[in-house]
Image: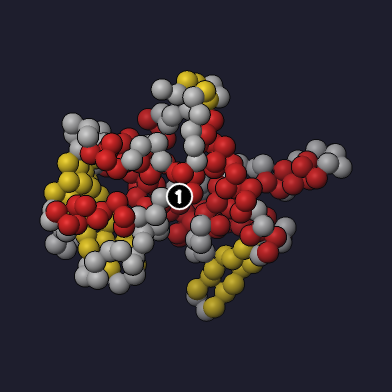
Amino acid sequence: MGAPYYQFCPVAKAMELLDERWTMLLLRELLLGTEHFNDLRRGLPRMSPTLLSHRLDQLQRAGLIERIAQGADVRYVLTPAGAELRPVVEQLSAWGVRWIGELGDAGLDPKLLLWDMHRNIDHETVPDARTVIALHFTDASPARRRWWLVIHDGDADVCDADPGYEVAIEVRCSLRSLTRFWRGDIEWTTLLLAEDATTTGPSHLRRALPSWFIRPGYAGVPRVGVVVGASRL
């Protein structure tokens, strides 16, 4: 628990638990369905394993999550109290995308972007056979420029090295453009209008590609013309 505010106000009491660094982002991951420690680390790569363990223990003691061990398999599952925070996190997401300025370069991360995309695939729309999407980010450093999404049998994985499977479709664009598409700042057709954006592969797959992904709920939040601390064009 964080330092007490010494106020009876329920906002103060809630924030004694929730306003510690990484706690709300950890809850975001849990609300998105992530249950295993290593997967939580992939969604929060800058959070140390020690701090992650500590925060999980805090949330468990507070009654927001339950630790379920079945042999070597350990899962962290939200309790009703934790699940009740979903609208709080969703409203924070909506407020952030509506009022906070555009992302700077420090907020662009291909691994985090593709990790979020891989868990939001509409598997009903993807071809039944193994489908590999190769991505080339024109504005990323050489070591972070090439990525692969492998979709097969209702599952998906993110690879930073060539998995060796036949590529169904290749996307070449800037990391910023794909991030803006995923956030809902632009549509797929706008992304493809950029000079450095191309898709390669059978035409029916290129047309279907954006329908394979379900963008986060905040992508549909209407934008406004004035933002906190910046101006939106």
- Residue at image point 41% right, 22% down: 233
Quadrant of residue 173 in the image?
top left
The answer, for residue 71, to whether it is visible in the render is yes
**Residue 196, relative to residue 127: is it above or below?**
above
Residue 32 x/y as whole percent? 51, 57
- Residue 158 sits in quarter: bottom left
Residue 55 visible, this angle: no
Q: Residues within 10 Å of mark 1 (few under 14, many from 20)?
A: some
**Extreme residue toward the bottom, this view:** 71
Residue drawn at (33%, 44%) of the image: 110
- Residue tagged 1: 216
Residue 188 screen position, x and y as percent: 29, 43
Number of numbered labels in the structure image: 1
Q: Nearer the viewer, residue 82 or 57?
A: 82
* Left or right: residue 133 compared with residue 51: left
Quadrant of residue 54 within the rendered picture: bottom right
Amino acid type assigned to the residue bearing label 1 in the image: Pro
Pick the residue in front: 157 or 58: 157
Query: x, y percentage for residue 109?
Result: 37, 41
Instruction: Tell whether 31 sits left or right of 191.
Output: right
145 sits left or right of 64 in the view: left
Q: Which residue is nearer to you in this view: 51 or 89?
A: 89
Viewer-closest of 131 and 48 = 131
Q: Could you tell me which residue is drawn at 12 percent across and 56 percent down?
A: 202
